[in-house]
Amino acid sequence: MENIMQYITAGNIIFFILAAATLLFGILTVTSTRILRAATYLFFTLFSIAGLYLQMSYDFLAAVQLSVYAGGVVILIVFAILLIKGLGEEKEINKGDRKIMGIVAAIMGALVCVSFIAKCGFTNSELAEQIAEQVNMHMIGSTLMGTEKYQYLLPFEASSILLLACIVGSIVIAQKNKEVKK
């Protein structure tokens, strides 16, 4: 009993809550028959993943997760959903062979993940803390916004152009749908 009690810490409890929320909302995302609810569940999935990043002391990744994915991509998905017709309608439910193939694909993906985890294992937390101490926020910021070799200003700007193209595309599609309805 004492061995079990040493593993029950606040950090472990928070991890299991976040992991359970990630799994629950992830499953709800892919099984929901209403597309707006699926987008909402996706938001909560990404939010709980950001919580896991925070628990691992990856503050930058958590901020990127919240701002880019939970804040940007999910909002674009919601706008696209709201611009298309049939928002309240349920989607067509797949039957028969597609469900079987989906289950087979999910099982195969799970087996690949389990075999990879078993092969590689996990690093200890001391090594992760040493790596985190070597890489600071200033280094990450200068790498993202630099124009020198091995710096990523161009891909960073390309992603913003991609998001802008998504917004313009959704407006064009909305205008076409509006003209068709008239």
Image (spheres, rainbow, N blue to C red):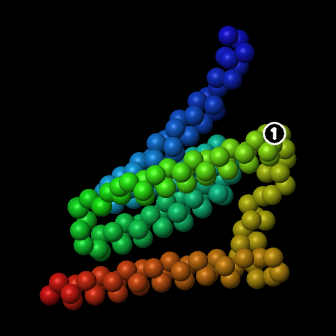
Instruction: Give the residue pinned by disc 1.
Output: 124
Q: How many marks?
A: 1
The correct choice, above or below, for 17 with respect to 151 in the image is above
Question: What amino acid is labelled 1 in the image?
Answer: Asn
Determine which quarter of the picture holds residue 40.
bottom left
Q: Looking at this rendering, what residue extends furthest in the front direction?
A: 97
Q: Position of residue 176 (x, y in %)?
A: 28, 87
What residue is at 64 percent from the left and 43 percent from the top? 55
Of the 4 image quadrants, the one containing the N terminus is top right
Q: Position of residue 27 (x, y in %)?
A: 45, 47
Left or right of 151? Residue 41 is: left
The correct choice, above or below, for 63 with respect to 86 in the image is above
Left or right of 12? Residue 86 is: left
9 and 34: which is toward the camera? 34
Of the 4 image quadrants, the one containing the C terminus is bottom left
Q: Looking at this rendering, what residue extends furthest in the top direction?
A: 1
5 and 104: which is toward the camera? 104
Residue 113 visible in image: yes
Residue 47 visible in image: no
What residue is at 34 percent from the left and 60 percent from the top? 35
Q: Position of residue 169 (x, y in %)?
A: 41, 84
Secondary element under disc 1, as helix, strand or loop, is loop
70 and 122: which is toward the camera? 122
What residue is at 71 percent from the left and 72 percent from the top? 144
What residue is at 64 percent from the left and 77 percent from the top? 156
Q: Give the crowd class for mark 1: few <14, some 14-19, many >=20 residues within 10 Å.
A: few
Q: Position of residue 149 (x, y in %)?
A: 83, 81
